[in-house]
Image (spheres, rainbow, N blue to C red):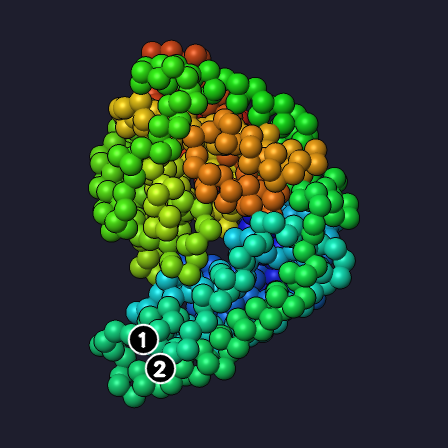
């Protein structure tokens, strides 16, 4: 999702008493003070509403209002929060941003962009009824509960148990909206959903003590909890699992197999084939890129980037002693020297590489987050058919490190030469560094914890892959081709995603295009194209964001010359957290101007 609004749309605000007006004469200063007070009050109401609507977000920052809750997926809540968001936006637009200090002008621009985007999306029934992709939805998000919950106090455990029980209502609301999606023709295409029922079935076990949901109770009793309370918690948890969690998964499995799967879409797989699909996809392009680019403009940019990167790949293949790019890629895909067969060995190799990369961080950044990260496998229930890796944010408040999750299935499709680029993207200096730092910045908690602009976050991740060049990570032709393949992967997304959703491409056309241009394995390409078909527009954000950050770095280097400080540039890019690309550009331009004036 692009930002907090797109994820939660916002529940009811807590009413904050109006700030007292400062004693001041009428005039410019008075007007500015009034605008500032109005904005600060509104922002706080939005933040409180966000916490009300997002119980697990509240938990992650140590706010106990969300204890035992999972949020509200009902269509009634969706409609109510859309109206509330309109009211928030109207109040925001009544405030003149020129009357705000510079830091709040940035803040204002971020908040307005979030509301504008969320409300634009609310005009489409796709956002109203499509609640899951081939990779999951509310049901597999819930499966991460035992990994992302704090377990320190009796209240923590009680909250966890109550959330297990709350899953029944969340699931019922999700099914109700998805049933409406079937009725109105907003189902996912059939091809990428093959095997989807297996993801649901993996959550079902005959013995609840063998479920990951029982994990918090599998060890010794915490010293801070009495024996009687511990036994009571275990009894409540067993009842919740057997009477709420497992029956809910079975209910969703039956709905999917009996109602949804028989009505999945055949023919053209793109969202173009759904009611209003052309307009919806154009919105998704704008939303995920935070630009005004059209699908055709993105497609053409992708073709240009593919041609550029392909030429670089040809040069690397020649350096490796191969006559053609294709011959080198075939070698990389098939030579056993590049693959491991032991899952734990593969995990240890990745962990050691991550620690090596850690050593470069002070050379690239002046400010580092306190929160550490670890490297762990993707949970077994979520691994089959999933992406190669992903990042899970941590929380200092709940005692959770960030997690670089690695897929340990199908190791014959996961070459070692891709791991350097993968690590710098998912962990540091990519997602972990950016997201953990955002959580600790001296900015309002709404921005520190509630905003997620995909073009910035994923653009930074892809830009970080390029930083691996400066770290010396790509010290063999195979690793350099791995980096180029990953960059090509993101460039082909611009072509493939727009091809699928605005030009009527088939899945096979998309697969063939990626096979021809990237060094990714066939299994990874198949999983990726399935993802693009069910999640239109999201894959565009990476390359668009990376190109903007690279453009700004080049601009700064040329303007500042010998005075350019790479660490200062990186800190500047990251010091506002995730922002729309136009806000980032304005901010970096101001930084360049200030550096020149001080020089």
Q: Quadrant of residue 259?
A: bottom right
Q: In this view, does 58 lie above or below 456?
A: below
Residue 466: give x, y in percent of width and height.
Answer: 38, 26
Residue 297 x, y percent position in the rendering = 66, 25
Dot placed on the residue nearer the N-terminal end, 2 or 1: 1
For the point 51% across and 42% down, the residue is: 526
The front one of 522 and 307 is 522
User: Residue visible at 65% across and 38% down?
Assistant: 506
Indicate the quadrant where residue 28 lies.
top right
* Rendering coords of residue 534 (x, y %): 60, 48
Image quarter where the C terminus lies is top left
Q: Mark 2 points at which residue?
A: 234
Give the alpha-carbon distance from disc 2 to disc 1, as whole Å: 7 Å
Q: Is mark 1 on a helix, strand or loop?
A: helix
* Mark 2 nearby-residue class (10 Å; few <14, some 14–19, many ≥20): some
**Element class at badge 2:** helix
Q: Which of 476 and 39 is in front in this view?
A: 476
Left or right side of 576 for 16: right
Q: Do we see residue 97 in this rendering?
A: no
Q: Position of residue 136 (x, y in %)?
A: 53, 56
Whether residue 316 is situated above or below residue 189 in the rendered picture: above
Q: Which residue is drawn at 43% across and 12% down?
A: 558
- The residue singled out by tag 1 in the image is 217
Does the CB distance between marks 2 and 1 fall below 8 Å? yes
Residue at horizontal 32 percent and vertical 43 percent from the top = 369
Along the horizontal axis of the image, is 323 left or right of 346? right
Crowd band around label 1 with a 10 angstrom C-alpha radius: few (<14), some (14–19), many (20+): some
Instruction: Check the image and report above or below for 327 versus 254.
Output: above
């Amino acid at each position: 999702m692009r930002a907090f609004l797109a994820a939660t749309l916002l529940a009811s605000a807590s009413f904050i008493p109006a700030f007292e007006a400062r004693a001041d004469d009428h005039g410019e200063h008075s007007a500015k003070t009034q605008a500032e007070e109005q904005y600060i009050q509104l922002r706080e109401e939005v933040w409180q509403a966000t916490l009300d609507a997002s119980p697990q977000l509240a938990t992650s920052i140590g706010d106990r209002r969300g204890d035992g809750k999972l949020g509200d997926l009902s269509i009634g809540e969706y409609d109510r929060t859309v109206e509330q968001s309109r009211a928030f936006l109207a109040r925001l637009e009544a405030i003149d941003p020129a009357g705000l200090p510079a830091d709040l002008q940035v803040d204002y621009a971020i908040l307005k962009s979030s509301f504008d985007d969320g409300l634009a999306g609310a005009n489409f029934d796709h956002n109203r009824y499509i609640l899951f992709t081939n990779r999951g939805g509310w049901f597999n998000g819930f499966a991460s509960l035992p990994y992302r919950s704090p377990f320190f106090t009796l209240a923590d455990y009680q909250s966890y148990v109550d959330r297990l029980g709350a899953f029944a209502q969340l699931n019922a609301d999700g099914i109700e909206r998805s049933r409406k999606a079937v009725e109105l023709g907003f189902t996912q295409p059939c091809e990428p959903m093959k095997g989807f029922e297996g993801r649901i079935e993996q959550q079902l076990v005959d013995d609840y003590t063998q479920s990951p949901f029982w994990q918090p109770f599998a060890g010794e009793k915490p010293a801070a909890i009495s024996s009687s309370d511990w036994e009571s918690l275990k009894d409540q948890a067993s009842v919740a699992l057997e009477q709420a969690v497992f029956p809910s998964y079975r209910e969703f499995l039956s709905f999917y197999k009996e109602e949804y799967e028989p009505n999945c879409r055949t023919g053209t797989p793109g969202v173009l084939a759904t009611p209003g699909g052309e307009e919806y996809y154009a919105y998704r392009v704008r939303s995920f890129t935070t630009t005004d680019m059209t699908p055709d403009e993105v497609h053409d940019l992708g073709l240009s980037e593919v041609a550029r990167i392909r030429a670089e790949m040809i040069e690397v293949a020649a350096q490796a002693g191969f006559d053609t790019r294709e011959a080198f890629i075939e070698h990389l895909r098939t030579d056993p020297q590049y693959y491991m067969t032991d899952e734990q060995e593969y995990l240890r190799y990745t962990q050691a590489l991550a620690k090596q990369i850690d050593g470069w961080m002070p050379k690239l950044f002046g400010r580092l987050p306190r929160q550490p990260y670890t490297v762990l496998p993707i949970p077994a229930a979520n691994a089959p058919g999933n992406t190669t890796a992903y990042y899970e944010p941590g929380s200092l408040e709940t005692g959770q490190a960030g997690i670089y999750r690695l897929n340990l299935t199908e190791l014959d499709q996961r070459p070692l030469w891709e791991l350097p680029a993968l690590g710098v993207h998912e962990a540091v200096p990519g997602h972990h560094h950016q997201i953990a730092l955002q959580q600790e910045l001296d900015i309002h908690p709404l921005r520190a914890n509630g905003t997620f602009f995909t073009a910035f976050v994923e653009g930074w991740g892809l830009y970080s892959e390029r930083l691996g060049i400066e770290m010396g990570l790509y010290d063999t032709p195979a690793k350099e081709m791995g980096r180029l393949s990953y960059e090509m992967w993101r460039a082909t997304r611009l072509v493939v995603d727009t091809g699928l959703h605005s030009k009527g491409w088939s899945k096979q056309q998309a697969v063939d295009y990626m096979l021809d241009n990237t060094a990714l394995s066939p299994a990874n390409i198949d999983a990726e194209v399935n993802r693009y078909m069910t999640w239109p527009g999201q894959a565009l954000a990476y390359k668009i964001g990376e190109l903007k950050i690279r453009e700004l770095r080049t601009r700064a280097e040329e303007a500042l010359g010998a005075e350019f400080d790479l660490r200062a540039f990186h800190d500047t890019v990251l010091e506002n957290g995730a922002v729309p690309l136009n806000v980032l550009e304005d901010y970096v331009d101001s930084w360049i101007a200030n550096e020149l004036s001080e020089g």
